Image: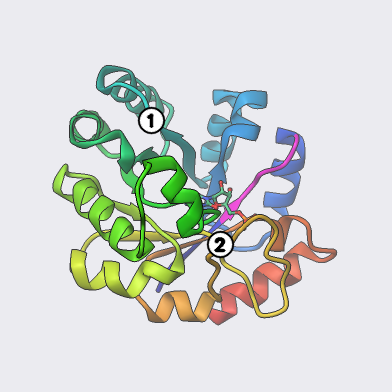
Amino acid sequence: MAELIVAFDLPSGREALDLAARLPGLRWVKIGPILHVREGPALVREFTARGLRVFLDLKWHDIPSVVAGAVEAARAQGVAMATVHALGGPAVLAAAAQAAGEVALVGVTVLTSHEAGDFERVVGRGVPDLGFEAERLGRLAVAAGLRGVVASGHELTLLRETLGPDPWIVVPGVRAPGDAADDQVRTIAAPDAVGRGATHLVVGRPITRAADPRGVYQRLMESL
Ligand code: C5P
């Protein structure tokens, strides 16, 4: 069964803790830059003290020693999963993997908010197929010893085929038909993501901005 991770991109730790308490059976919480810059490690500790697994999604992209240092700090805080950008390259990924210990490190391939044109402007060449880019970056991450990758649902089938059955594939940009896409471009419905081999689904605004977050969360859990 795939795991559901709720992305708490909320303005305060208090709101995140209150919402988490309203979601029955919640196992994973994702803390990104918004909450981490505001609340720091105290919120990580508060969530772990409540028995929740923290996915620290800061998407590190820096020189190897700095990324490895950040991974060590996350490990000391009891973080269960964290992200690095696969675009950092093999030396960064290897240093991160070496520092990871029990932290499941996953490599971000192509952001789910990117279309081919956006990615072309970043890498300065034509990108006829984003799937190829995700596959290339996914291979780099797994070859360096990371636990898995973060990718959009559109690249899932290809990545599962390429990487084999073991690596985690964490999929953000999950939307039910009729949901607002927000700033996501390459979205997928939860049952489709599971069917194509996702191990973890990341869902933020469809839950956090819902009139009835608990109802949306429970329906999602049932669909898994
Ligand atoms: O609100 P929404 O469901 O779109 O949230 C998706 C979450 O997944 C956000 O917290 C975002 O940081 C994260 N994410 C993403 N695309 C990636 C990696 C992470 O949207 N490639």
Residue depicted at x 19% and y 36%: 90
Q: Quadrant of residue 159?
A: bottom left
Residue 160 painted magenta: no
Residue 61, numbered circle: 1
Percent of width and height locating residue 114? 51, 54
Q: Quadrant of residue 39?
A: top right
Image-based side of 49 in relation to 194, left or right = right
Is residue 194 something that shows in the picture? yes
Residue 119 versus residue 60 in the image, above or below: below
Residue 7 painted magenta: yes
Is residue 81 something that shows in the picture? no
Give the extent of the magenta segment.
Answer: 6-11
Q: Main secondary structure of the magenta part?
A: loop
Q: Measure how far apart labels 1 and 2 are at the Cα level.
A: 21 Å
Percent of width and height locating residue 42? 59, 25
Percent of width and height locating residue 206? 70, 63
Q: Which residue is mark 2?
A: 173
Image-based side of 118 in relation to 108, left or right = right
Q: Nearer the viewer, residue 217 or 67?
A: 67
Residue depicted at x 28% and y 72%: 158
Give the class, few, some or many, for how many residues have Cα within 10 Å of label 2's Cα (few <14, many ≥20). many
